[in-house]
Amino acid sequence: MNAKVAKTNSARTWLFWVLVAVVAGVMLVSWFLPWWSADIEALGKDMIQIRPWGLQIDERIGGFEILLKGAPMPAWFGPMMWAYLGLCMLALLVGLAAGEKDISYGKFKMKLSQFLVGGVGLSYIVAGIVAAVYASIRMKGMGDIPLQGTVLIDLGDPLITNIDTRLLLGYYLIFVAGLLLLALAIFRDTITGKK
């Protein structure tokens, strides 16, 4: 009977690992997809895109480049964001390898894997919220461009056109991945069958 229980627990532990790996895949998909895009009616679609590691500007932007003065992120931002992604993936791997190791602070006690998986999920949700708030603030200074919507930009003839902006699937997947990681952390013991 004990061998059967151990085998079941082992299978359920593997299920937890597979679920974390799948959600880590969703996180990576969201990372490599653009989060935000702007179409400049006079020039074309996806002329400006926000990605997790910075701004991507189409070379055909021409005279509208004046809108982007001061918009690109500092040189250290891209490497910092790639380091963040690397740390998140490392934390998930350590969380999976941690097994039944506990951490405690006073009366507070939880599994290390719960702490790391939930921490990555929470940090990714926070990163998505901060990205949207920061982008909104920066775009206010660039002709009052909305995070989502259409605005007429008049930089003098012939630079008068509509700019259509929108959040993309990559952005929404941030919250899918983050919430799923939080759920996996909360229900870890239920999934693995270990108290």
Image (tube, helix red, strand yellow):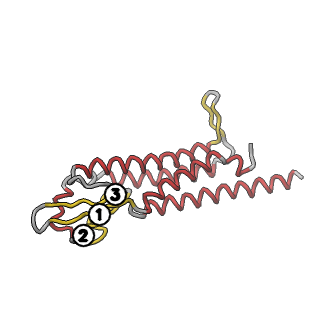
Using the image, determine if residue 14 lies above or below residue 46: above
At a point 77% along the width and 53% down the height, the residue shown is 9
Q: Nearer the viewer, residue 191 or 148?
A: 148
Looking at the rendered image, the quarter that the C terminus falls into is top right
| Tag 2 secondary structure | loop
Q: Residue at x 61, y 47 (%)?
A: 185
Q: Which residue occupies 37% across, 50% down?
A: 131
The disc, 2 or 3, on the residue closer to the chain's N-terminal end is: 2
Q: Position of residue 103 (x, y in %)?
A: 62, 37
Q: Determine the secondary structure under disc 3.
A: loop
Q: Residue furthest left?
A: 157
In the rendered image, residue 181, in percent from the top left (x then y), is placed at 57, 51
Quadrant of residue 108 in the image? top right
Label 1 environment density (alpha carbons within 10 Å; few <14, some 14–19, many ≥20) = many
Q: Which residue is mark 1?
A: 164
> Counting residues from the N terminus, which is met first, the one under dot 3 or under dot 1?
3
Residue 174: % across, % down = 47, 55
Type of amino acid at the residue the image marks with label 2: Glu
Q: Gap in Å between the C-alphas at discs 3 and 1?
A: 7 Å
**Which of these two is toward me, 70 or 151?**
151
From the viewer's side, name the closer residue of 9 and 142: 142
Q: Earlier in the sequence, mark 2 or mark 1?
A: 2
Residue farthest to the right, as pictured = 1
- The residue tagged 2 is 41
Residue position marked by numbered label 3 in the rendering: 148
Q: Residues within 10 Å of mark 2 (few under 14, many from 20)?
A: some
Task: Indicate the secondary structure of the residue bearing disc 1.
Answer: strand
